[in-house]
Amino acid sequence: MGEFVLVSLYLKSIIKSKIVRKLITYSIFIFLVLAIYDSTQTGSDSFDSLPTGLSCILILTMSIFYLFEQMREPDNLFLYSSPHFWIVVGIIIFFSGTFFVFIFSQNSLKDPNFEHSFNLINSSFGILKNLIFSIAFIIKPGKSSDNSLKRQNSAYLR
Amino acid sequence: MIWLQAFPLQANSPGPSTVLFFGTLGMLVLAIGLVVFIVFHQRRVIRYQNQLQRMEEEQQKILLNASIRWQEEERQRIAADLHDDAGPLLATARLYLNENLLKQEMNVQLQSIYNAKQIIDDTIQLIRNISHSLMPPTLRNFGLESAINDLFQKISGSGSMNASCRFHDYRQRLAPDQELMIFRVVQELVNNILKHSNSSFIHLTQNYSEDRFYLRLHHDGRGITQQDFDKMNKSSLGLGLKNIQSRMKVLHGRINFEKDLSQTYYKVTMEVPVEMEMMTM
């Protein structure tokens, strides 16, 4: 729950579209209500697959939207010279990799084989995510491309 | 290997482990594919932008060269006018007024002075013509409508072509620089029509709408379309057309060459955002 809220707030801070920012705020509230309702229904001893799966889908959607937004109106001349890009890539890879394992967790986590798989997948993608995040922390932010890419098509006589 | 051991694939029916393995792998491939696609697409966009920028710079260079060449030609023309016409006239006047004039008889003196005066009058007229060709006084004093009317009356007066113009909405004069540039464009267009089109008439109409000033020229001779205009602008030919292009760029306006729907006339439409004349107290 906390993870979803924090990641959503981070994505909200880097997405430029006002409508999507509003939608993120609403989705946080709706998600919180749904997660609290779900926890009252299923009990605290089982894995809450539904809210976790939903949070994965929402975070992936927001991350993909950020990438498409950057594709349309890039902040940097080279997308991969921005730390935000690497953070979002880390988020996408982690949440897409762990999506299925979270979905199956509610029913199968008591199975020792599944638990082994769960730990393996979760840890592998966690390491991968942290490695990608470390690139984001090491990288120096690229120069802004205000003059080169936001330039309107100035071919006269359009 | 650890992963393959962790997910024993079941041959008969796909169990949760198989679904988990392929599902996770599929999602990972999709995610990496998406990121790779976005990175490559952005690189392609950058390449395209660079290409566009290069083309724009090239176009700017062509326009600048045309403008410099035009200036040089104009200077040469003025120099030739002064050297070939004003120079000999003044030299002749000097000959009439040399120091031997005082030793001549009275009537010879008077004749010489009269001839010199005639020559000096001709020189004044010549210099006035040169000055008018540089900056038409009608344009400066009475505005674009009068200057274009004047130009068209001269063309009609020559008898070679019927030229007419009509200003529908010209209540306030434009900024002097704008008027001069629009006038030069009209002059160049009319000059081209006279030289190349072999048409029997030129008609110009003016209109004004939503802070935009429109001028449209019609003629029934051989003309060019927008495609020809763009092509000639990119080639080394068509100095006058390049001047029109660079002037329109300075005016932040647009020009469009087209053939009339009836396929009988050629139309040239100019659209210029209006800058009103600054009122001086």
Image (cartoon, coloured by chain):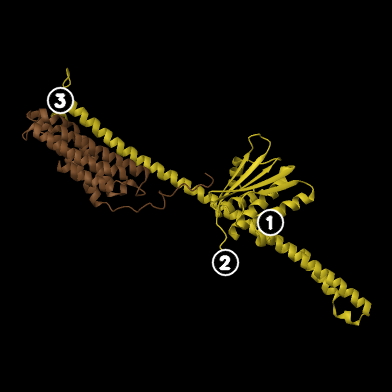
Chain colours: A brown, B yellow
Q: From this viewpoint, is residue A66 visible? A: no
**Mark 2, chain letter?**
B
- Residue B233 locus on image (x, y percent): 59, 47
Residue B113 sits in quarter: bottom right
Q: Which residue is mark 2?
A: B280
**Same chain, labels 1 and 2:** yes
- Label 3 to label 1, Cα distance in Å? 87 Å
Give the label, 3 or 2, closer to the camera: 2
Q: Quadrant of the N terminus of chain A?
A: top left
In the picture, measured across the screen, residue A45 lies left or right of residue B170, that is left
User: Relative to A100, is B280 above or below?
Assistant: below
**Same chain, labels 3 and 1:** yes
Mark 1: few, some, or many residues within 10 Å (few <14, many ≥20)? many
**Mark 1, chain letter?**
B
Mark 3: few, some, or many residues within 10 Å (few <14, many ≥20)? some
Residue A39 sits in quarter: top left
Q: Which residue is mark 1?
A: B147
Give the label, 3 or 1, closer to the camera: 1
- Residue A105 locus on image (x, y percent): 12, 31
User: Relative to the observer, which residue lies in front, B41 or B247?
Assistant: B247
Which element carries disc 3, helix, strand or loop?
Answer: helix
Residue B1 sits in quarter: top left
